[in-house]
Image (spheres, rainbow, N blue to C red):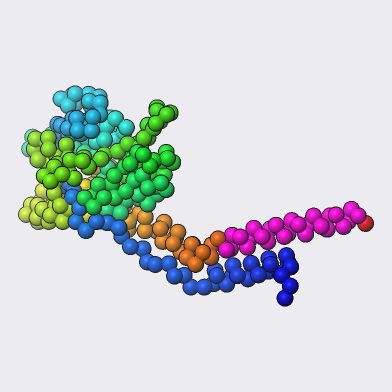
Amino acid sequence: MQLTRRNFFKFMGVTGASAAAAPSSAQAWQSKAPPDPYGCLVDLTRCIGCRKCEEGCATVNKLPAPVKATCDCTVFEKKRRPDVNAFTTVNRYFSGKLDVLDKPSPTYVKVQCMHCQDPACVSACISGAITKKENGTVHYNVDRCIGCRYCMVACPFEIPAYEYHDPITPEVRKCTFCFDRISKEGGLPGCATICPVEAITFGKRETLLKLAKQRIKSDPNKYVDHIYGEKEVGGTSWLYVSSVPFSKLSFPELPETPSPKLAETIQHSLFSYLWSPILLFGFLGGMMYKFDKKDENTQDKGGA
């Protein structure tokens, strides 16, 4: 058979269709979570809202001091989020719970990067600037960042912040989990070191989960039966226990499935056997042939 342009396009179309009909060999998605990373357990029943964790974080990461002094309770009048100058913030919530004097009892919640086991930001980062380390840290490498900000879109906790005010060398900013400190033997994150009431416990994630379950079991009237971060989006390195349902404390309700699982499975399925590019080229070739044929017909009519 002579390989004319017409036959070439037919061949491409058949090849593409055959590849599409072939069974996919894409491997099942596999978690990339480290086996037993470091983590932090935050006991919200112990937190007194002193905001010393904000102060310690700012000191360790060389950030500006908190906008308001730690003794200034007016800061709780407005809910705050971590930003480029504050990697952690503490907010106050009134859930209807009363203290022994029948006065509204507040619950204080520390917010920072959750350092997910299978981070969506890592999966979304096209330059490899964000990686998950064996010690549990979701680590950011500014030298590899291209400023696409896909990590900000992907994060289910809406944590990464961008230095929009810096047009020359902007960075994506978030809690570092004090990577350099915990990489050394015995090192602790700044917030866990400074907490005066031991509301933050640092250690291996499995050990922290056992501790959290023990606290809930030993005092079921004090704690809700839920460890936030144990299973949400595949699990996080930061874990929380509370006396108040997490839905009343602005914790997002998230599925147990890791965020990257669906996206990466679709990607692997699309590009298995390279059938997706073949279909694309076949489609483009067909379109080129169609327009070429239209031009030929137009020329023939003009010549007639």
Relative depth, front residue between 49 and 187 = 187
Looking at this rendering, what residue extends furthest in the right direction? Answer: 304
The answer to whether residue 11 is above or below residue 173 is below
The answer to whether residue 145 is above or below residue 68 is below
Relative depth, front residue between 112 and 122 = 122
For residue 168, what is the image quadrant? top left
Query: What residue appears at the point 91 percent right and 55 percent down from the top-left corner?
Result: 303
**Residue 179 visible at all:** yes
Relative depth, front residue between 19 and 142 = 142
Residue 7 placement (x, y as % from top left): 71, 69
What quarter of the picture does the N terminus occupy?
A: bottom right
The answer to whether residue 245 is above or below residue 234 is above
- Drawn side of residue 24 relative to residue 85, left or right: right
Q: Main secondary structure of the magenta part?
A: helix
**Residue 229 visible at all:** no
Query: What residue appears at the point 85 percent right and 54 percent down from the top-left corner?
Result: 299
Residue 276 is covered by the magenta coloring: no
Residue 172 placement (x, y as % from top left): 35, 37
Looking at this rendering, what residue extends furthest in the front direction? Answer: 2
- Drawn side of residue 6 relative to residue 129, left or right: right
Instruction: Look at the image and give the residue range highlighted in magenta.
Output: 278-303
- Drawn side of residue 275 relative to residue 166, left or right: right
- Drawn side of residue 64 relative to residue 46, left or right: right
**What is the count of numbered marks?**
0
What quarter of the picture does the C terminus occupy?
A: bottom right
For residue 80, what is the image quadrant? top left
Query: What residue appears at the point 68 percent right and 58 percent down from the top-left corner?
Result: 287
Residue 295 is covered by the magenta coloring: yes
Relative depth, front residue between 103 and 207 = 207
